[in-house]
Image (cartoon, rainbow, N blue to C red):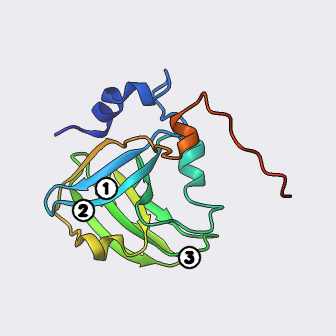
């Protein structure tokens, strides 16, 4: 099992020279205990600005997306516009605590946690994630555009005269 620091080292291509996640780097999170994918598009908030902003300013969080705040032992949903699920993890990515459907304007904490996953509301119920489960983080596959124009860069793109 790898801790968060070694995960950062293994994913060096996704991180800047200072060790912070580069914009656009994403992770996939698997609950090994239950063989369930919690999300396949997790953003990493591992330094001041991204940790402070969190999910603020968004209108929602689609299923399969989320934010991994590291290090973190408490979060708030002040100013948020939607509910989220929270999964608190220790350094070995073992689930310490879960909270489902946390609405806006709430506080939540787990003082023994090292990091927190903020997930789309309903994820914990769907995946049956529980304290004691072990999670695995891996690089997410890049999104692929399967449109015909994307597969043949030599083909001219059609333009529409519609406004």
The reply to whether residue 29 is in sight is yes
Closer to the chain start, of discs 3 and 2, is 2
Decide: marks 1, 2 in contact (CB < 8 A)?
yes
Up the image or down, 87 lies above or below 115; here it is below
Q: Which of 51 and 26 is in front in this view?
A: 26
Question: Could one spot residue 110 in this view of the protein?
Answer: no
**Would you name the residue on which mark 1 appears?**
113
Q: What residue is shown at x 25% (from left), y 69% (from top)?
A: 127
Disc 1, SS: loop
Q: Position of residue 152 (x, y in %)?
A: 54, 33
Q: Residue at x 31, y 71 (%)?
A: 124
- Would you name the residue on which mark 3 appears? 104
**Quadrant that contains the C terminus:** bottom right
Q: What mark, if any, has residue 96 been given in the picture?
A: 2
Position above or below: 22 against 111: above
Q: Earlier in the sequence, mark 3 or mark 1?
A: 3
């Amino acid at each position: 099992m790898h801790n968060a620091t070694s995960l950062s080292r293994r994913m060096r291509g996704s991180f800047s020279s200072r060790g912070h996640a580069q914009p656009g780097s994403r992770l996939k999170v698997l609950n090994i205990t239950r063989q369930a994918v919690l999300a396949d598009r997790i953003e990493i908030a591992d330094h001041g600005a991204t940790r402070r902003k969190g999910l603020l300013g968004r209108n929602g969080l689609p299923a399969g997306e989320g934010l991994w705040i590291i290090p973190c032992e408490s979060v708030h949903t002040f100013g948020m516009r939607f509910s989220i699920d929270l999964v608190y993890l220790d350094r070995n990515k073992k689930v310490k605590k879960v909270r489902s459907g946390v609405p806006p304007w709430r506080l939540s904490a787990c003082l023994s946690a090292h990091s927190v996953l903020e997930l789309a509301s309903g994820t914990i119920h769907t995946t049956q994630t529980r304290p004691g489960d072990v999670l695995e983080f891996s690089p997410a596959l890049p999104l692929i555009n399967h449109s015909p124009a994307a597969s043949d860069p030599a083909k001219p793109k059609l333009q529409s005269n519609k406004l």
